[in-house]
Image (cartoon, grey):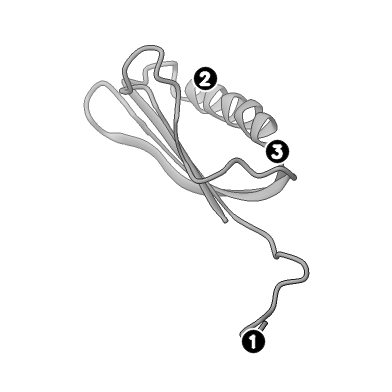
Amino acid sequence: MTCTIFHSTELPEGRGAILTGNIPRKPMRWAVEYLIKTPDGRTLVESTKIIQKASYDELYAIMDATIDDLGNEAGNLATFVSWRATAHGGTRKNRSKGRKR
């Protein structure tokens, strides 16, 4: 199971985020990439971050705080903000691994 969430300021109003896959039931480890651009077109921040064991709702709270902190460092002059989070699922129990049933 893989879950990918893409959130951007250029998505239509009321659209929220684009979700691919299923939302994990348990807290998962998330790989997050985020990008912030300034009014003159420069890329201010482009980075990857690993968030250890967070649920879907906790991930949004963490990313909101991260983007706010980065915006404050940049003087709140962002014209474009986006982030993509990906979690790769765990293991299934009682799964036959290539054996005949």
Give the camera-side residue of 75 and 33.
33
Q: What is the number of callouts on the image?
A: 3
User: Is 46 drawn above or below residue 73 in the view shown?
Assistant: below
The disc, 3 or 1, on the residue closer to the chain's N-terminal end is 3
Whether the residues at callouts 1 and 2 have beta carbons within 8 Å, the answer is no
Q: Amino acid at mark 2?
A: Asn
State which quadrant residue 18 falls in.
Answer: top left
Distance Cα–Cα, label 2 vs label 3: 26 Å
Residue at 46% across, 46% down: 47
* Element under disc 3: loop
* Residue found at the very far top of the displayed protein: 13
User: Is 24 drawn above or below residue 8 in the view shown?
Assistant: below
Q: Amino acid at mark 1?
A: Lys
Numbered disc in front, either 2 or 3: 3
Give the camera-side residue of 8 and 99.
99
Whether the residues at callouts 3 and 1 have beta carbons within 8 Å, the answer is no
Q: Residues within 10 Å of mark 3 (few under 14, many from 20)?
A: some
Residue under numbered circle 2: 72
* Element under disc 1: loop
Query: What x and y, as percent, mark residue 73?
Result: 51, 25
Give the camera-side residue of 14 and 60.
14
Residue under numbered circle 3: 55
Any part of residue 52 in sight: no
Q: Amino acid at mark 3?
A: Ser
**Numbered circle sitting on residue 100:** 1
Query: What x and y, as percent, mark residue 83?
Result: 45, 36
Residue at 69% across, 78% down: 96
Residue at 71% across, 42% down: 25
* Residue found at the very far front of the displayed protein: 101
Which quadrant is home to the C terminus? bottom right
